[in-house]
Amino acid sequence: MQTKRWHRSAVIWPLLMLVSLLLATVGGLLSGGKAVQGAEAGSIGPAVYVVPVKQSVESGLKSFLERAYKEAAEAKAERVVLVINTFGGEVTSAEEIGELIRKSKIPTTAFVEGKAVSAGTYIALNAENIVMEPQSTIGAAAVVDGSGKLIESPKVISFWVKTMRDAAELNGRNPDIAAAMVDQKFVLSMPEISQIKEAGQILTLTADEAIKVGYAEHKAQSVEETIKWLGLDNRDRIDLKPSVAEKIATWLVNPLVMTVLFTLGIAGIAIELFVPGFGIPGLVGILSFGLYFFGHYVAGFAGMESVVLFVIGIALLVVELFVPSWGVLGIIGSVSLVAGVLTAASSPITAFVSLVIALAVASIVLYFVVRKYKDRGIWNKFILREKLTTDKGYLSAETKDELLGKEGVAITPLRPAGTILIGENRIDVVTSGEFVASGKTVKVIKTEGTWVVVREVV
């Protein structure tokens, strides 16, 4: 039974490769289907691509927009309309999306549907023109941490103010208004709307205010009105939406979800390796890492080289358990495993932090599991724990208990050791210390292992 259990654990790493490759392939198929549709759109003539930006600004959104702009370019579209309704997100991803918009040969119009807050404001400012829904707002672009608390670092604020100002100036908008949306210490007078932005405030503009200060060019109730205002209402409209795989990937690349996947992956595989025989933890571990690579592959960050590095790392760690290498294989395997994880991530630093946290949590889980199931651990393969006792049917040597009480004749002097004859059997015996002459009758009074103790019969 033990052999079968270990065999199942030993094949974890090839299973991991198969699952990861399968998930990556499925992700490619699911996300690639839209590209074909976009290419075919080129045959129907000029078109307007409508692309939603209605989620947190992060790496998954950036990947989706890259696909959208690529398809729009292949279809020779005349315009991309970004429908923005977001509370913002990562500054890094917002910068990359802004660069994507600026470098595109296709003009972009931002239609603010609801809110363009923080990173959403920055994305909108990179568009050639901004159209806003009547009740929508734009601004509140202060930098906050993961808990929503304002970051007051002068270095961070200065960087984001400069970035926002540059985006505003790109299309002739007042850069001071962009600065007032970021820096709460910035004081600004806006006579166009009879408003003064005081220190301690973060500027947010309504649709009417944005038009008056030149931050929006038009108000519209819908995307259809926006396209009509652009004079493109006679063009084909193509609504591009995230694929199922991209929606899943957006969730999977979240740092919190990534940490959970790492924890389940490390703990599951470690439990299966060190306490073999369960099956389920190993499967959970494989699927967790498979989902990690799937999400980052679909998001456009992970290549097959990342998966290969990870699988090689797992393989070397397994080999280390069987082939002592003074830790060399273990070290190389660990480096390969970590490299596979980090090269697949959009932010290696974030991934490394998540990996360290997951390793700590998984170690605690593994400790309690190993402690509870210590009798099933792999170390039992190398430690002899069986006791070959008599009560279990094992005999370390032949016993002579059947001679107890029998009489025989000393055929040699017993000084105190010698030989006696019981029936036709010669037996080596000892006395309790006394001398017994040859030819005397003796009786077996004690047997202890191979020892036979006799006494002269008087």
Image (spheres, rainbow, N blue to C red):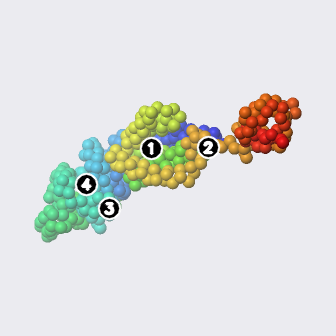
Q: Which mark is residue 385?
A: 2
Task: Identify the residue under disc 3.
Answer: 147
Q: Which of the two discs, 4 and 1, labels the residue nearer the N terminus?
A: 4
- Residue ID at (31%, 46%): 78
> Mark 1 or mark 2, which is nearer to you?
2
Q: Is residue 118 left or right of residue 428?
A: left
Q: Which of the two discs, 3 and 2, labels the residue nearer the N terminus?
A: 3
For the residues labelled 1 and 2, say whether their Cβ atoms are less than 8 Å apart: no
Disc 4/disc 1 C-alpha distance (Å): 30 Å
Mark 1 lies on a secondary structure that is helix
Task: Identify the residue under disc 1.
Answer: 293
Disc 3/disc 1 C-alpha distance (Å): 27 Å
Pointer 3: residues within 10 angstroms few (<14), some, or many (20+)?
A: few
Task: Identify the residue under disc 4.
Answer: 122
Q: Which kind of residue does numbered mark 1 sit on?
A: Phe
Q: Which kind of residue does numbered mark 4 sit on?
A: Tyr
- Between residue 404 and residue 206, name the one nearer to us: 404
